[in-house]
Image (cartoon, rainbow, N blue to C red):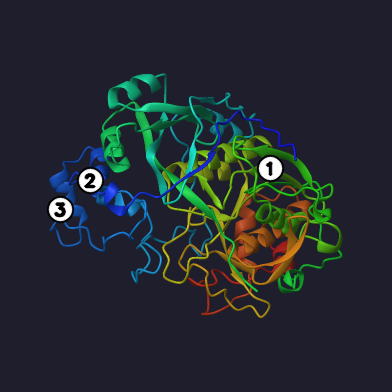
Amino acid sequence: MAAKAVIRFAALAAMMIAAAPALAQTNDPNLSQTEIDCLNRGTTAADCIKRDTEDGSGERPGAGPAATGAVFLPALIVDLFPNPVGDGQAPLPTPDPRRDPASGALPPPVPPAGAAAIQAAAAGGPIVSPTDLVAAEPPRAVVGDFVPDEVLVTVDGDAVQQIAASFGLEVRSQRQSQLLGTTLVRFGIPDGRPVGVVLAQLAADGRTLRREPNHIYSLQQAATIVNYAFERIALDSREASGENVRVAVIDTAIDDTNPALSGVIADQFDAMPDVPIEARDHGTSIDGLIAGVGALKGMAPGARIYHARAFEGGKSTMDVILAALDWAAEQDVRIINMSFVGPKNDLLGVACRNARALGIVLVAAAGNNGPKAPYGYPAAFDGVIAVTATDAKDGLMQQANRGAYVFLSAPGVEMVAPSGAGSDVVTGTSFAAAIVTGAVANLLHTAPDRSADWVAKALAATARDLGPKGRDNDFGYGLLDIKAAATAKK
């Protein structure tokens, strides 16, 4: 399979680096995340801590020990990450990131500094393509929540080398990001300082705009033991069509010899070209469920799939995902499917917000980490349609994440989907997200002028209520009803 790399991007190396022991990343410099936030706000740490803690004691409530053997940041930025799955803690107290259920209103997007290209695109102007990536060495795939010796920083201007020299960092890659509207730099930490310490140091430097760990994200496929989706979402398989609707998928590589993908793929991009391709099943299933043809017909046959490979071994990093998102935005797609989950990352949040400002419908898997799991991102970002999975009887998938961010339910349990060169039975919120993406392509095929806001409001207003009355943390607004959504008023 020949993948066309539009953006020259340094990829993850094939070598997987083992996760460091928990104690290897615990040099806590007595700073909390709240204190780091205070540095950004210019507030004195003492005053800020007293105000931001629950009892004024300066202690961080709910900050428990990390799972043994996990790669994690020290306590100073512990709230950047979800609590370890299965630790018995309640989900993080993140407010409902969605629109007001009564009004359906969305807050206006806030472009980052230096995002003139995004603002122009949102106003109907041309999209400015990013420059080629400049990389000193390829990124590396690791096991854990984040790459332990790297940080991602956005810089407005030509101060990249000066920042590296000032803080003893290495420039491992840099490129102009379309969706972030500024230069994204991947700095390496050669001297073993914890990521949290470096982020705290960079926070005081006015030449840096945003500073984040290089988080790790995982595909959301659950293990299981048939395609009933058409019936459950009220879509007539004989009339289903996404003809000429441009859909981007960020996932694993695909097997484009699968008959279900014949003529389906419009273009491909490899965000990690230096990493050998080993897995193709997940991406093949997602593309097939969206727009497959033949015996394994997808929800929106005729849709044009723009497929970005950004995962290997079920994992990817933030810098690779951002490169894939930038490429997708350049293809003038109407929908982006993101069937993966990871920690909250501000850079990803900005990219999603600006993609939505361009009129792109964002669909993401809610996650398969169980009822007590923290919120999964990008699904929990405002403006992203977070999809959970239900079975043939509209029961909730047991492993599904729960929370106020869950927006919609769709079939995703034990469905037959293309896989490799054949087919398989698949389960997971990944596949439920693909069903929603295909359904949205049908809506845009019949009425191309429908906006991303209209789509979100129509899906919410017409969903078939499941569970407690009204929107709830399990099913969101309820089960997708595409027939009803198609008749919703503007």
Q: Residue 119 in the image: x percent, y percent?
A: 54, 33
Residue holding disc 3: 50
Q: Quadrant of the C terminus?
A: bottom right
Three-letter amino acid code at the position of disc 1: Val
The part of the image, by quadrant, that contains residue 4 is: top right
Question: In the displayed structure, does residue 167 sit left or right of residue 9?
Answer: left
Mark 2–mark 1 distance (CA, rounded to whole Å): 44 Å
Question: In the displayed structure, does residue 414 sit left or right of residue 195?
Answer: right
- What mark, if any, has residue 284 been given in the picture? none
Q: Nearer the viewer, mark 3 or mark 2?
A: 2
- What mark, if any, has residue 333 been given in the picture? 1
Residue holding disc 2: 27
Three-letter amino acid code at the position of disc 3: Lys
Numbered disc 1: secondary structure? loop
Q: Are marks 3 and 2 in contact (CB under 8 Å)?
A: no
Q: Quadrant of the N terminus?
A: top right
Three-letter amino acid code at the position of disc 2: Asn
Location of residue 211 with respect to 439 vertically, above or below: above
Crowdedness of circle 2 by 10 Å Cα count: few (<14), some, many (20+)? some
Numbered disc 3: secondary structure? helix
Residue at the image point whose x is 16% and y is 41% from the top? 44
Mark 3–mark 2 distance (CA, rounded to whole Å): 23 Å
Between 213 and 419, the one lying in front of the other is: 419
Crowdedness of circle 1 by 10 Å Cα count: few (<14), some, many (20+)? many
Residue at the image point whose x is 29% and y is 43% from the top? 196
Q: Which is nearer the N-term, disc 3 or disc 1? A: 3
Residue 489 appears in the figure: no
Q: Nearer the viewer, mark 2 or mark 1?
A: 2
